[in-house]
Amino acid sequence: MSSLALALVIASAFFHATWNLFAKESEDKLLFLWCVLGAGGLVFLPILMLGPWPALPREGWGYILASGAIHASYYSFLAQAYDRGDLSLVYPLARGSGALLVVVPAALVIGERPSGLGLLGIGSIVLGLLLLHQSPGGRLDLLRGAHVPRALCTGATIATYSTLDKLGVGVVHPLTFVVYFHLTSFVLLAPWILLTRGQRLLVDLSRQRGRVLIAGGFQNLSYGLVLTAMTLANVSYVVAAREVNVIIGAMLGAWRLREGRPGQKLVASAFVAAGLIMIGLFG
């Protein structure tokens, strides 16, 4: 992975972990995430309309619509997982399982083959994520809890959309791609949101509009940086290196939400960092 691609991924990690913190702190997480999708479109759509961006080719719409549908499932699973588990558990599990699962579709669909040291780096990241879930008594809490199946489903959608989006940014500019597929997810989720939460929508939006706007900007900026990195490096390396955001997410969980075990999370983060360095140097 080039130094530029690595820098883009690390920069995206801060923005990604922050909007996930906002989602975890919200009362109705799916409603908050849906509002964030709409806010992100409002923030970035004028930029697309005014800027000299490349024209969106017709074949790009298929990738945008497919990615929007997968991301709609991603937000649904993520909201359910955050309803049932801590940020410092759900976030690493979802991201880590996505990094592990993306290697297979990347190899089968795109033809990317990570090197031996690249695989070792991915393994180090996954090991760090497992350590984050180890209880003080040595039990692996990854196998327990109502949040686990939802977080794993979130990871599966991450693996799927990462592979699809790698193909999409081959024909569509990354910023154009991320804004339009987020708007697609917003439209696809709208009927369910309006049907089940229509009466609370304006109340929740007025109460959290500042956070919604910030999270919407951070969400699109974060993934736009990742998609740009995907044009410069193998998708399995980009997704794995992106797991540096679990360090930030775990620390936000310990500091902001007081979820505990900061020492253990620092050790686990060292494994994640080691994997990131290995991928950056030898991938």
Image (spheres, rainbow, N blue to C red):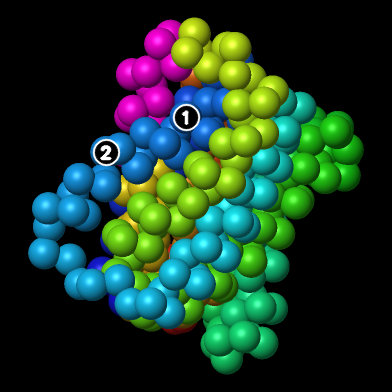
Query: Relative to 94, is 193 above or below?
Result: above
Quadrant containing the N terminus is bottom left
Which mark identifies residue 132? none
Disc 1 residue crowd, few under 14, some 14–19, many 20+, Cα 10 Å: many
Residue at horizontal 60 percent and vertical 40 percent from the top: 189
Q: Quadrant of residue 52?
A: bottom left
Which mark identifies residue 35? 1
Q: What stretch is highlighted in magenta?
A: 205-217
Q: Residue 219 appears at what percent x and percent y? A: 40, 43
- Asked whether 149 falls inside the magenta stretch, the response is no
Does residue 281 appear in the picture of this structure?
no
Q: What residue type is labelled 2?
A: Val
As drawn, is 49 to the left or to the right of 143? left
Q: Residue 4 appears at what percent x and percent y? A: 26, 69
Residue at horizontal 50 percent and vertical 71 percent from the top: 63
Does residue 209 appear in the picture of this structure?
yes
Report which residue position mark 2 lands on: 43
Q: Residue 74 appears at what percent x and percent y? A: 63, 49
Q: In which quarter of the image is residue 281?
A: bottom left
Residue at horizontal 20 percent and vertical 72 percent from the top: 54
Q: Are the residues at dot 1 and dot 2 in contact (C-beta closer than 8 Å)?
A: no
Q: What secondary structure is marked by label 1?
A: helix
Q: In which quarter of the image is residue 127?
A: bottom right
Q: Residue 165 appears at what percent x and percent y? A: 49, 69
Identify which residue, 190 or 178, lies in the foreground: 190
Disc 2 residue crowd, few under 14, some 14–19, many 20+, Cα 10 Å: some
As drawn, is 99 to the left or to the right of 148? left
Query: Relative to 56, is 157 above or below?
Result: above
Q: What secondary structure is marked by label 2?
A: helix
